[in-house]
Image (cartoon, helix red, strand yellow):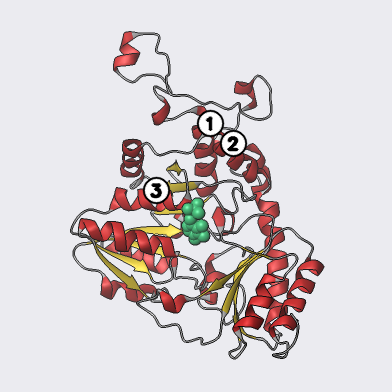
Amino acid sequence: MTHATDISKLGTGTQLTLVGRNTKDQHGFVNPPLYKGSTVIHSTLHSLENKGGRFFYGTAGTPSIENLENAWNHLTGAAGTVLSPSGLGSIALVMLSVVKTGDHILISDSVYQPTRHLCDVVLAKFKVSIEYYDPLIGVGIEKLIRPNTSLIFLESPGSQTMEIQDIPGIAKVARKHGVKTVLDNTWATPLFFKAHAHGVDISIEAGTKYVGGHSDLLLGLTSANAECFPALRRTYETFSMMPGAEDCMAALKGLRYLQLRVKEAERKALYLAKWLETRPEVVKVLHPALEGSPGHEYWVRDFEGSTGVFTILLREGFSRKNFEAMLEKTTVFKLGFSWGSYESLLTTVNPTSYRTATTWDHKGAAVRLQIGMEDLEDLQRDLELAFERLTAPPNARL
Ligand SMILES: *Cc1c(COP(=O)(O)O)cnc(C)c1O
């Protein structure tokens, strides 16, 4: 529904059922129709020459795209949203909207690796000076700001290593110096962290993860406050890189029960994370809702929940053969990238290979878990058997 102000007092679950559709405009059908199109017919020359009407050409918007933009504005409290064909596409778009040649930008050392690659390979080519900072630096970031600093990029929690950042603190310092803040909020989603209410200028969600929820969608959503939205929108329209109508529809479907899915992921991930803390094979569990996880105090202060992705650090000394057997022979968990879908996944984590501003002291292996919709008992049993293979004697048949 487009009457955002009417529904904002309702509960989140209710709002998720109402956003991005308007039954009255849809001949009574519950869901909006799919609009695919390039040409829009104008009935007057005046309209044609002035790009009149609500829509004037496919790249400038369609009802299918607008429905999802409206829904996301509503959920994020943003002044405006633009969509991209992937999460990484959103990150690239934001960089091109905010950063120019000669600028200095600050990027959290914990960012999603392809974000780092984008900075080091593409932005560096345009003579942008890129500086990585310790994700736990907090308001100490002020010392790194230079006269030509234009952007601070945050990701909280950080991909793989799960540090929660002092987002309001950093946002306040940035604002004081006229620097824009950009947050990759994919893990928490707007349900568990309200980026703009905490002072963030531009917030990015890889819709590929929880919004899609089925490993069948690539999508990015970028929301901005009133100050940053016009430049973002101009950049978006200049590049004309947008998702197809079917993908917008899939994202709207994912939104309908997003709350149910993240809460279920939260419940099971927390249970497993606490159990994993008691395992002798595990040195540490990096899960923002657990005490001792980096930046946990900021999570307590700023977040309304946790989702289903976290990392475990294994004790040193297991053989490669046992480690492979641990991860390859699971029956419920599978090896694979991405997360936020209904199936549980494992990936290995190796921050030493790419970090530059902080050191990674852990010597053993690290594994990231994505908790899906399977039953808790099956997930736990799968991990128990995985640990048996990890700790099996050298001659054991695995
Ligand atoms: C997956 C991911 C992205 C990129 O999303 P894609 O749609 O796969 O390009 C960006 N940020 C984070 C934190 C992610 O996990």
Residue drawn at (33%, 20%) of the image: 51
**Kind of residue indicated by mark 3:** Asn
Q: What is the secondary structure assignment of the residue under circle 2?
A: helix
Horizontal relation, residue 124 to residue 78: left or right: left
User: Label 1 belongs to which residue?
Assistant: 64
Q: What is the secondary structure assignment of the residue under circle 1?
A: helix
User: Label 3 belongs to which residue?
Assistant: 225
Residue drawn at (63%, 76%) of the image: 324
User: Can you tell me whether the CB of the residue at mark 1 lies under 8 Å from the nearest atom of ligand 1?
Assistant: no
Are the residues tagged 1 and 2 within 8 Å (C-beta)? yes
Horizontal relation, residue 319 to residue 239: left or right: right
Q: How crowded is mark 1: few (under 14 residues within 10 Å), some or many (20 or more)?
A: many
Q: How far apart are marks 3 and 1 (CA)?
A: 22 Å
Q: What is the secondary structure assignment of the residue under circle 3?
A: loop
User: Label 2 belongs to which residue?
Assistant: 249
Q: Residues within 10 Å of mark 2 (few under 14, many from 20)?
A: many
> As rendered, which of 362 and 189 lies closer to the eye?
362
Are the residues tagged 3 and 1 within 8 Å (C-beta)? no
Q: Which quarter of the picture shows residue 380?
A: bottom right
